[in-house]
Amino acid sequence: MKCSNHPRKEAVGVCIRCGKALCEGCRNFMRGKILCSDCHSDSFFDTFDFSFGFKDFGKAIKEWAITIEKCPKCGKLIKDDFLICPYCRMPLKSKCNHCGRTVEKNWAACPFCANKIENDKE
């Protein structure tokens, strides 16, 4: 494979960001990784290697953020799939009397079986 910048020179590596083949003179090292001069000067922070156990950290944050809400009674942060508040024990969801699926306390009907929901008002 030949260098992208110098077609007469043999490539000794490829840029980890753009995939350009690079010769000895063109390659730049950052944290032990090869970058071309364009990618090397683009952004320092793009080359960090974070390992969080999932691939897309931004997506994970967004998913976590939309699953958090406040308890209507005590105001503490809770996950949206909790059945009761773990702090004040307020019921947050109930079960449909007809199909047994979990339903929100403020729903008038079960979206799974169309049964009317009888909720205790607190």
Image (cartoon, helix red, strand yellow):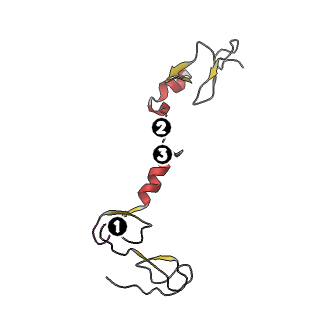
Which of marks 1 and 3 precedes in the sequence? 3
Give the mark toward the camera: 3 or 1: 1
Which of marks 2 and 3 precedes in the sequence? 2
Q: Amino acid at mark 1?
A: Pro
How much space separates mark 2 and mark 1, taking CA atoms? 32 Å
Which of marks 1 and 2 precedes in the sequence? 2
The residue beneath circle 1 is 86
Q: Residue at x 52, y 23 (%)?
A: 32
Q: Amino acid at mark 3?
A: Phe
The residue beneath circle 3 is 57
Report helix, strand or loop for mark 1. loop
How much space separates mark 3 and mark 1, taking CA atoms? 27 Å
Q: Which mark is residue 50?
A: 2
x%, y% of residue 14?
A: 63, 24
Q: In this rendering, would 121 be left or right of 11?
A: left
Say above or below: 85 vs 68: below
Report helix, strand or loop for mark 2. loop
- Residue extent of the magenta highlight: 70-75
Magenta stretch, overall SS: loop
Using the rendered view, name the quadrant where residue 3 is placed. Answer: top right
